[in-house]
Amino acid sequence: MIDDRNAGGCLRSMTAADLESVLKLRNHAEIRRYMFTQHEISKEEHRSWFDRASQNTGVELLVFELDNNCCGFVQFKATPFHGVVDWGFYAAPDSPKGTGRKLGAAALKHAFEKEYLYKICGQALHWNKPSIEFHKSLGFFQEGVLRDQYFDGTDFHDLICFGMLKRDWVAKESQSEIKK
C-alpha cells in the first residue's frame, strides 16, 4: 500500500475489490463527459480493462481514499521514453472540496519520490476547463496543442498537452515549504 497521509489522504494500488467503486466513479456523468470514451462502461468492459492493465507492467492503477472512502482514481502509463509516463485521473464529483488537489499532490509525490519518474505528461480536451486549470494549478506547463486530434464521432477536437518534470515539482515543493 502506498500511504501518503501528508497529502491528506491515502493513495494505494487498485485491487479487484475496488472495481465496483472505481466503475461507479468512472460512469458518473460529470466524469464521463470529459473522457475520450463517453459511453457508460459495463461491468464486463471494466473488468476486462482492469485485467489487461493489471498484467501490463507499464501501467499503475491507484485509488485515492479519504476516510476509507474511494474518492478518486489515478493511472500512470509508461511511454516508450525512460522515466516518462502519461497520467489520467478523476476525483469523485461529490467528494469534499479540495479532494482533487489532495489526489493530485499525492499522485505527484508518489510518482516523483516513490517511482523516481522524470516526467509526467497529461492531456485535456480543449473544452475541459477544469482539467486544464487543475494541471496548471499543480505546476504543469502547457507544452502544446494537438490540433483536431480527437474525433468524437461527429467533430474533431484539440488536445491540450501538459508536462511536469521532476525538477519542476521539486522547485514547487521547495517554494511551498518556504511559505509554511
Image: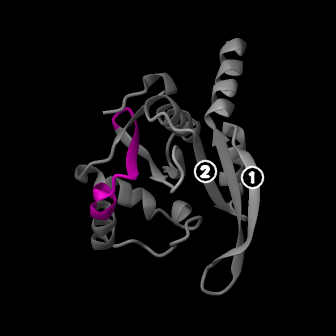
Q: What residue is at 69 percent from the left and 27 percent from the top?
A: 172
- State the residue position of label 2: 121
Q: Is residue 96 magenta?
A: no
Q: Earlier in the sequence, mark 1 or mark 2?
A: 2
Name the image quarter holding the N terminus: top left
SS for callout 2? strand
Q: Look at the image and give the residue range highlighted in magenta.
A: 51-68
What amino acid type should be assigned to the residue bearing mark 2? Cys
**In the figure, residue 40 lies in which quadrant?**
bottom left
Instruction: State whether residue 8 is above or below residue 76.
Output: above
Instruction: State whether residue 56 is above or below residue 69.
Output: below
Q: What residue is at 71 percent from the left and 60 percent from the top?
A: 160
- Could you say which is closer to the camera, residue 143 or residue 131? 143
- State the residue position of label 1: 143
Is mark 1 in CB contact (under 8 Å) with mark 2? yes
What amino acid type should be assigned to the residue bearing mark 1? Glu
Q: What residue is at 34 percent from the left and 66 percent from the top?
A: 49
Q: What residue is at 70 percent from the left and 13 percent from the top?
A: 178
Report x, y in % for residue 129: 72, 56
